């Protein structure tokens, strides 16, 4: 089965897992998803993630979701740049999410990074999502 938006699928699985108060979810593995999960882990929105091999030579990512006092740490995760409409931004005009309390994930020529890293390195790129 092919997905038209695998990154949107990742975000939907995270949202659905948190609504059900699951401790972990499984996501099909890809390098781009791995980089996005690395940014979420470094910023403290998820506990951890692991690569699991299945029997038919496919890989899965097991994502450990994070909760604080029974509530999910991720209140909102929303896809900004979609397959039908890509959104790009310069380093000087990267939006601040919730006055700096949230996070935007940016795909730059130097790799996937948070909005604060992109501003610090003065690199623009495609705005993948926003997390709060």
Image (cartoon, rainbow, N blue to C red):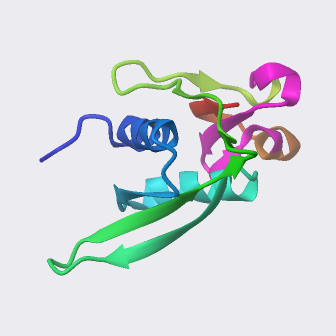
Q: In which quarter of the image is the C terminus?
A: top right
- For the residue pair 44 and 103, the one nearer the viewer reads as 44
Q: Is residue 74 visible?
A: yes
**44 above or below 89?**
below
Question: What residue is shown at x 40% (from left), y 42% (from top)?
Answer: 13
**43 above or below 106?**
below
Question: What residue is shown at x 41% (from left), y 25% (from top)?
Answer: 82
**How far across and down, in percent of the image, does residue 86 sit?**
46, 23
- What are the residue bounds of the magenta stretch? 93-116
Image position of 22 (left or right of 2):
right
- For the residue pair 55 and 23, the one nearer the viewer reads as 23
**How far across and down, in percent of the image, does residue 6 sit?**
33, 42
Question: What residue is shown at x 65% (from left), y 52% (from top)?
Answer: 66
Q: Can residue 110 be seen in this view?
A: no
| Residue 131: in magenta span | no
Give residue 62's quadrant in the image: bottom left
């Amino acid at each position: 089965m092919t997905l038209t938006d695998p990154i949107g699928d990742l975000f939907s699985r995270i949202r659905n897992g948190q609504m059900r108060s699951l401790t972990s979810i499984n996501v099909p593995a890809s390098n781009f998803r791995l980089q996005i999960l690395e940014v979420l882990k470094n910023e403290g929105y998820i506990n951890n993630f692991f690569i699991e091999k299945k029997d038919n030579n496919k890989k899965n990512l097991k994502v450990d979701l994070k909760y604080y006092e029974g509530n999910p740490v991720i209140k909102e995760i929303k896809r900004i740049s979609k397959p039908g409409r890509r959104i790009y931004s310069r380093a000087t005009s990267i939006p601040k999410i919730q006055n700096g309390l949230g996070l935007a994930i940016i795909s730059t020529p130097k790799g996937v990074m948070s909005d604060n890293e992109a501003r610090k390195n003065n690199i623009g790129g495609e705005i993948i999502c926003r997390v709060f």
